[in-house]
Amino acid sequence: MDSNTVNDLNNTLKLSPTVGESGSMREPDPFTPTAIGVAVGNGFVKASDGTTDLCVRSQALEHHPQFLAPSNDVLLLDALETPCLMGQLCIGTGLDSSPGVISLANGLKGKYYAAFALAAVARLADNGAFINLAVSLPNKAMEPLLAPLRDSHTVIINGKRKHFIIDQVRAFPEGLGTAMRMRELRAQRNSSVPSFAALDFGHGNTTVVAIDGAGKCSGFGNTPTGVGALFEEIATNLSGKTGGIPPTVDAVRLGIQLGTFCLNGHGSIGFANEYDTALQVWAKARLQELHGQCSQLLDRAEAKVVCGGGANLPGIMNLMPIGYAKAATPQQLEAQGLQRFARAINA
């Protein structure tokens, strides 16, 4: 990464101009802002308001199925007055086998980003809230997708009618919220905070963000390959056990997530050996790609921490080089860090 890019990123951390334009529905600023951070990933939507954390699967139906009730894992959204979507959206778990299911892992993040982010904000926001929002994006080209969020919204979320205003929206590179949150946690425990690198294994990509001892970003890199590619490889390799038709990626994911290494988390078709083999190949490839991009960042970091959903893969830490540690609550760090950025808006 060149020095100009790093300088641009550190200027972004100073929270200069907002993305998006004022919408026709926006109203004057009558409230103290609520700070919310949202990370819409290919695998999960994560959000935090500083008190409550949210993590739901990035898959949806454009209607509310009768067999699913609202919960912490299922968001049922009715759009009453919002520029982000029309009609209904059901986001969360239990939709894998439903006809017409939408998965952001299938290249649909651009189309549904604002709607998924709105659902997460609605779940955390109080009725009447005035909100400053920080989100993460894989690239700056996606920033125009955020414009519908900066507006007034009236929705029903999990049976509760809410009206709120998102006044400010700021976008940050994926992985930066994680790195900053980790630094904050380290500072709470120690008077001295070392330079470190956050290695974030996401569903759709793998990211490294390096923070120096002064708290400034010293560089970052990413590859467009994440945990989803591992699941796809395992599914392909299992076609011989499933009559020549590969199982779904979510069937593989459930078996790994539950630790049973059986399709859909149960049953007679196991894949423990296939998982071990594929994991070793996948992890080696990701590390080689990142070292090719940002070996100096990783070598200079006094501490290296593995985070993101991939940090929970069984056996992944055994394949990491010496000196890497696993973050606590690795999936929630990104949204928590973004919430800190949102809290600093207009401070």
Image: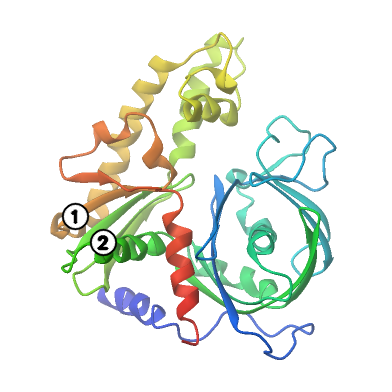
Q: Secondary structure at mark 2?
A: helix
* Quarter of the rendering containing residue 84: bottom right
User: Which quarter shows the N terminus?
Assistant: bottom left
Look at 46% across and 67% down and name the residue there.
338
Q: Amino acid at mark 1?
A: Ala
Q: Nearer the viewer, residue 157 or 205?
A: 157
227 lies left or right of 54: left
| Residue carrying label 2 | 186
Q: Are marks 1 and 2 in contact (CB under 8 Å)?
A: yes
252 lies left or right of 103: left
* Crowding at mark 2 (Cα within 10 Å: few <14, some 14-19, many 20+): some
> Residue 219: where, in percent of width, then height?
27, 66
Q: Secondary structure at mark 1?
A: strand
Q: Nearer the viewer, residue 217 or 245?
A: 217
> Residue 212: where, in percent of width, then height?
21, 69
264 lies left or right of 209: right
The numbered disc on residue 303 is 1
> Residue 256: where, in percent of width, then height?
47, 27
* Crowding at mark 1 (Cα within 10 Å: few <14, some 14-19, many 20+): some
- State how far apart marks 1 and 2 are (Cα): 11 Å
